[in-house]
Amino acid sequence: MRGIEPIRRESPVARPWDPLRALDSVMTLTPCRCGQEIYGQEDPAECWYRVVCGALRRFAVRPDGRRQIVDFLLPGDWFGFAAGSDQHRFAVEAMASGTVVSCYPRRRLEMLADSDPRVAREIRAMTFGAIERLQNQILILGRMLAPERVGSFLVEMAERCAVQETGDRLVLPMSRYDIADYLALSVETVSRAMTDLKRRGAITLAGTRRVRIVDRDALDEGDGDQD
Amino acid sequence: MRGIEPIRRESPVARPWDPLRALDSVMTLTPCRCGQEIYGQEDPAECWYRVVCGALRRFAVRPDGRRQIVDFLLPGDWFGFAAGSDQHRFAVEAMASGTVVSCYPRRRLEMLADSDPRVAREIRAMTFGAIERLQNQILILGRMLAPERVGSFLVEMAERCAVQETGDRLVLPMSRYDIADYLALSVETVSRAMTDLKRRGAITLAGTRRVRIVDRDALDEGDGDQD
DNA sequence: CGAACTGTTGAGTAGACTCAAAGACCGTGG
DNA sequence: CCACGGTCTTTGAGTCTACTCAACAGTTCG
């Protein structure tokens, strides 16, 4: 079972009390095949989820059939808390084999939060994390040029994957199609932008998903005007 | 002092306990001139805020000088809770004269939340509201054609302003420039898209900010292929 | 080994951006 | 009250980016 060990985003350093430990009692683990649906668009929202390992995509399908990805979910990320409503607005699917998520019955979790302020704090922290991801995506979508968008996307992924130790080497868990549907670009444009960044010397590629970030500033400042 | 009466988004119907009442003790009211800054990008995040009346924009300014608006804030909306960090990532400015916001010291609010689960619930509800707005903006930015984006933006504003009673009549609190910076379009394109939707019969305009939605479906299905 | 999927590259087109200018609207001050 | 300056808004002309359609290379998997 290599590569399926749980990963905690926050390193488990001397913390007086681990909120996740307390939630373990109401949690169930679910392993997923690649492409497997966790829940569908408009399914009832009965559980909150947390990525243990692997990667997932959260998306909506428009009436015209176009798919729009709203979030990529990595180990440690929470998802599935529909805003107030009892219904999901987006579907969630595993992008990698060996993905495992933990499920927390919503009612139980809310009861726990009512009885223990530390759980409530943990829930606040998790929603703030979700807000940060959404804001980052909006900033990325606000870029006008395709290489800028792809570049800042790579920077965000690098930060989320915490690749400081790996020397800015990064393995993308998603396909070009996924990136295209996340950035609101066509696949061809994503591919061209990658080639562009490579030719420009901002990144190097080993295979299609193994990216090494060479010039971080060139990436998120856009393809810009520097020489 | 006409037009400056507080507006609650949730109608104050028979609700056993009003969480906002409990927060009033730590709250201070701040009236703002049009264009006035509530806080700046990277200011320390000491307070959370709530819009009492008026309208504000939340935005970032890029290194290249372009402004990107991340959220429009209307009466009842909370803002200013920076994700975990002690620093804001965006600036907030009033868009209308007669705007009033209420400020809640962050530490105090968190202490209140720890001692009263109903306050914690209220905070959860408010963050879910923020998440919903961000997701809507991502869905809008995901549209490929300018008239689609402007159209779905108008639908969202109509829903947020709760114009059911006014017969789909809507007064935009923001300029074309603000809309452009929200939709990641140029001002000219926003203007052309408006004229387009008008010519198409999806909306009518009285002045520049008074919009009447005639054909809602034509708006958020895009400019589409129907006839 | 073939089929399906993923990824890259090319050619042509359509939509959005920039630059430019003119018209509408607003608040101010004479 | 009206004239004025400034901002906001609209429209036009030309350029450029990204989309679509198409073909081909590389990979994975049955």
Image (spheres, coloured by chain):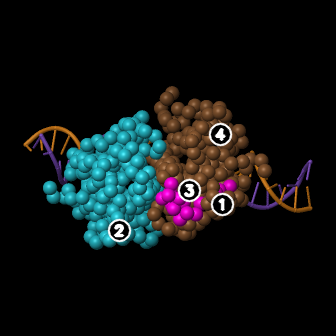
Chain colours: A cyan, B brown, C orange, D purple
Q: Looking at numbered disc 4 in the image, what kind of residue is underneath it?
A: Leu
Up the image or down, B81 lies above or below A68; here it is below
Q: Position of residue A196 (x, y in %)?
A: 35, 61
Q: Looking at numbered disc 2 in the image, what kind of residue is underneath it?
A: Pro
Label 1 vs label 4: CA separation? 30 Å
Circle nearer the viewer, 1 or 4: 1
Q: Which mark is residue B28?
A: 1
The answer to whether tags 3 and 1 share a subunit is yes
Q: Quadrant of residue B49?
A: bottom right
Circle nearer the viewer, 2 or 3: 2
Q: Which residue is mark 3?
A: B79
Q: Looking at numbered disc 3 in the image, what kind of residue is underneath it?
A: Phe
Q: Residue at x 24, y 47 (%)?
A: A30
Chain on which label 4 sits:
B
For this view, does A202 lie left or right of residue A99?
A: right
Circle nearer the viewer, 2 or 1: 2
Q: Earlier in the sequence, mark 3 or mark 1?
A: 1
Label 4 vs label 3: CA separation? 23 Å
Q: Which residue is mark 2?
A: A16
For this view, does A174 lie left or right of residue A148?
A: left
Q: Which residue is mark 4?
A: B170
| Neighbours of disc 3 within 10 Å: few (<14), some (14-19), many (20+) | many
Label 2 vs label 3: CA separation? 30 Å
